[in-house]
Amino acid sequence: MIHKISIENFFSIADRQEVILKVPGNAPSLPCFQKSRVKADERLPVVVGFFGPNASGKSTILRAVASGALFIRASFSIPPEGFIPFFQPYKRKDWWEKPSKILVEFDGAYPDENTDVLFRYELHISHTQERPGQSVLYEALSYAPKGRFRKLFERHEQTFSFGQEFEIADNDTRVLSIRPNASVISTLAQLNHKLSLQFSTFIGTLPTNSAGMDKAQSHASQWLPFYSTNPAYLEKLNRELRRLDVGLEEMSIEQSSQGLFAKFRHVGLDGFVFMDEESVGTRKFIEVFPKLQYVLETGSVALIDELDTDLHPMLIPELFRWFCDPERNPRGAQLFFTAHNPALLDEMEKEQVFLTEKGSGKPSTVYGARDIKGLRREPSLMKKYLAGE
């Protein structure tokens, strides 16, 4: 579970913005708040929503976390002289040559151990006016097995130091392979460093549709192979489609001379319905389902930009309930999303809601609804939001 996000000089964000997820002690005991796996007295929301006007910075929050995870997993594949993608400074002259900074605190099992601990990953990327994403200025991974953070590794540009628990010596020859534009974890994972392999999988595989300059567009050509090679997910999808009573009995995938295709059997129809005949909402649900199911099974985090686009508004609260159900979500999976539909606010508590603003010619700011003085839970967060409170 994510405990904290800190972002500085990243796309529409200039000054450091923090998202603190810890639920105050005086908040009621509700299914949407789950106990932290590492702090018995701390609760965290399992569903977190970012709301605000268009271009206010909602997507920037998810993009920062997704870009950091992608850097951890795949930066080794960047060409030696290539720039680091998906990192842009705030586009004013006084920010162009300042580093972009991302920090995420999250809990999870330490590799090869059954005990959950709190981790902190921090990354600073340098820029020049001509070349954003120049190189890594700072990178560090820490953990807190007994309450205080201890460095697993720390890097200042091309100077590295490693904690004993990271199981690699400062003079290990594999360190020489870490390039200025690649992550320590991504590089050492490629060189069969055991802990880096595990951390790369653990940190770097966050299901998301948010990366790069825009929301990643999903097409049937992307998710058809997944369902074809993962029949258990296809079975679970069909079970949900039947349970949600959308008139769909089954989706099946078949191979033709032109590739994979999906066909749908509907209640009351004698023939099959094909993909381009299905509603956009049905296709969106089929696209997002494996991302949500994966995190519910693994206790990971899903980052879904514009969750409310194309999905029926009555279906989204059902997705929220999946995460709030301890039987369906026994490992503390989280859903982070952006949305425009203010009606969703009435499905959430104020500790789950974060708001973004961006004045004309100004950078984005983010703050929690719970931080608004005098904001009560009742009767309706949606009405208060629309009224400008």
Image (cartoon, rainbow, N blue to C red):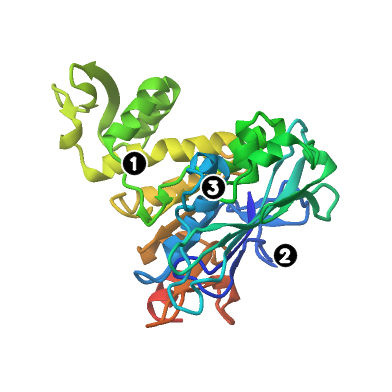
Query: Which residue is disc 2 drawn over?
Result: 25
Q: Residue visible at 80% across and 54% down? A: 149
Query: Which residue is disc 1 drawn over?
Result: 285
Sequence-wise, the earlier of marks 1 and 3 is 3
Label 1, secondary structure: give it: helix
Label 3, secondary structure: give it: helix
Q: Residue visible at 53% across and 54% down? A: 65
Sequence-wise, the earlier of marks 3 and 2 is 2
Q: Amino acid at mark 1?
A: Phe
Dot in front, 2 or 1? 1
Label 2, secondary structure: give it: loop
Measuring from the top left, give residue 21's x and y in whole percent: 63, 61
- Spatial separation of the CA atoms under disc 2 and disc 1: 35 Å
- Spatial separation of the CA atoms under disc 3 and disc 2: 35 Å
Q: Amino acid at mark 2?
A: Gly
Q: Tell me, yes or no, whether the two marked residues, 2 and 1, touch with CB atoms within 8 Å.
A: no
Mark 2: few, some, or many residues within 10 Å (few <14, many ≥20)?
few
Query: Which residue is disc 3 drawn over?
Result: 71
- Placement of 255 over or under 166, stated as above or below: above
Mark 3: few, some, or many residues within 10 Å (few <14, many ≥20)?
many
